[in-house]
Each structure stands twice: as structure tokens, then as C-alpha cells.
Image: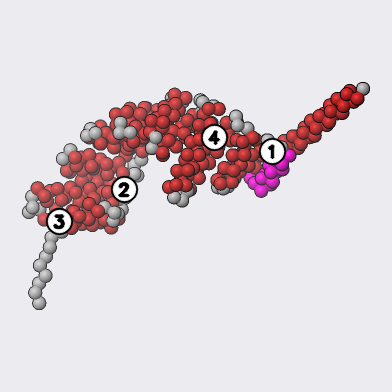
Amino acid sequence: MKPCRFIAVAVLSLSALTGCQMILAEAAVDHYVAGKLAAESENYQLALAELARAVRFDPGLSLAHTAIGDIHRKQGNCAMAAVAYENACQVNAYAFRPHYNLGVTYQMLAQQAKGDDAMTAYIAKAIHTYLRAVTIRPKDFDANLNLSACYFQQGKFELAVQYCAASTAIDPKNPFAFSNLAIIHEAQGKPYDAIGAYRKSLELDEHQPKIWLNLGTTYARIGRMPQALNAFGFAAREDPRWPVPWVQMGSCHFHMKQWDKALAAYTKALELDGDCAEAHRGIGVIYMSRYVVDRTLTDMRDKALDSWTRSLELDSSQQDLVNLVRKYTPTYAVPEL
């Protein structure tokens, strides 16, 4: 009979332990719900207190750790958010959301990092976390796209293409994924692949002035000036107050030796922004080009020097322009007293 009594006592103890665990789990859920409700009311102090109670009752409640991370991130405290998401990932290695949120938080910390080493370390952590996220949920668009962006920052362009292409396959109607793919191809030195991706992005959403500008810049880089002008024209129409497309049109016309059209484009850029250093520089280039052809046109030289001087006042980092001003500024003899 003794063995039977021993078994009966063991079963009683296990039953009591299970009941205790159930009570703790129920209490954890109650505090979790209270914390979520407080967060929805933007009472974040109370929410964090309730969620802290939830994880004390049940340290394995991944949802509570994740909710704590969400609040810290919303409040701009990415370091504490990362700790909470890390805890959530540790207690549930197969939960997608905390892994994804942790990857996003590491990217945010990389942006805030002081120094290249810290930024590089956070990007590496983001990659490790996103790889886990896409393993858990391979068809998640955002996880693949963000992983691609991290690899791009590392300069690992083939891997960046791999995951960006995966995001385009997951959501082939998302223009942002195709524009990202184009930028990666640009970095790879593949302008024709970039053009194809830019055009696909614009087919999906033609109201993207920056993508029109990127497309035009790529066309100009390979010498296809008429196509570049067309793209810059679309950029200007999509954002009529943006001077940059007009600066680029001026550059295209200049390379096509269409001096008057180039001058008109640069002038339009200055109408939109009188402090556009690039437009002042471009106007100076046109005037100086005319002087170089005919050295009697000293008024062209003087206009060029005036434009270049203004450009340098706005952006003094243009060392090549400093050298040109020095080269073409006339010297005058000092009168004897």
C-alpha cells in the first residue's frame, strides 16, 4: 500500500502545481489586457506598470514583452524597446512580430548611433533578426524589404537584390519595392537593370517625382539625354515647386549644346529657389563657355564670375569652382602712387 500512497501524493502535488500555474497565467492575462487598454488610452505609465505585472506573473508571456517594446518605441526609447523585444524573442523563438519589431528597432538604433562602429553593429543585429523573421514567415513583404535595405547598407548588393526581388514577388504591385531594386542596381553599376526597375515602379504609380528624377539621372549617366529630359520634365510636372528637375534639365540642354534652353532651365530653377547653388553654378558655366569661345565677350565672363561667386556663397565646398573663379578672374595692375 505504501507505493500507492506515494503515487497518490505525487499526483496531488502535480495537480496543485498545475492549478497554481493556471492562476498565475490568468492573472498575467488580466494584467496584459489592462495594459493594452491603458496603452490604447495613451496612459503609457499605467500600461507599462500593468504589463510589468503581467510578465512577473508569467515571464513566458511573449505578447506582454512585445507590448512593452511597442510602448517604449512609441515613446522614442529604442534601447529599452530593443530589450523588451529581445525578451519576447527569447521566450518565443517562433513569434514573428517581436522578431520583426526588433529588426525595425535595431535599424532605428543604427540611425541614431554615434560612430560608424555602433551603426555597423546595429545593422548586423538587424540582419540577424530579420533573417529569423523571414524564416518564420517567408512571405512577409516588409521583412524581406527591410532585410534588403540592411544588406544594401552593408554593401552586400547581391543579397540586397535577392531579398528585394523576393519582396517584389510577394507584392508585385508595390512601386516602392521596385524603386528600391532600381537603387540597388544603380549601386551595382547596372544602369539598364535600374532603368527597367524604375520604369516598373512608375508604371505602378506615376506620381513619384523623385523616381522620375532618378530615372532621368540614370538616362543622363549613359548619355541618353532626350530620355533624361523627358523624365526630368515629368518630375517637374509632378512637383512644380521643386527646382532640382530644372537644374537637371539645364545640365542636359548644356550637354546637348542647347545654350538658350539650358539658360532658361537654370533660370526657372532660380525662380523657384533663388538660393539654389547648382542653378547659379550652371548659369555661370553657360556664360563662361561663351567667353571661352570668344574672348572679346568679357561681359559673359563677368556674368559667369558673378554667378559662380554666388554659388560659392551658398555652397563653399565646390573646390573645382573655386579653382575656376581663380583661373578666370582678371588681374588688375595696382596704380603707382
The residue that mark 4 highlights is 100
Neighbours of disc 4 within 10 Å: few (<14), some (14-19), many (20+) = many
Apparent side of residue 336 relative to residue 17 in the rendered image (left or right): left
Which residue is painted at 31% across and 48% down in the image?
A: 272
Question: Which corner quadrant of the image does residue 246 belong to?
Answer: top left
Q: CA distance from mark 2 to mark 3?
A: 29 Å
Give the amino acid type for the residue marked by disc 1 in the picture.
Pro
Q: Main secondary structure of the magenta part?
A: helix
The residue that mark 2 highlights is 272
Q: CA distance from mark 3 to mark 1?
A: 74 Å
Apparent side of residue 244 relative to residue 15 in the rendered image (left or right): left
Residue 232's disc is none
Residue 59's disc is 1
Q: Nearer the viewer, mark 1 or mark 4?
A: 1
Apparent side of residue 197 relative to residue 71 in the rendered image (left or right): left
Confirm or deny contact between disc 1 and disc 4 (CB under 8 A). no
Q: Nearer the viewer, residue 5 or 104?
A: 5
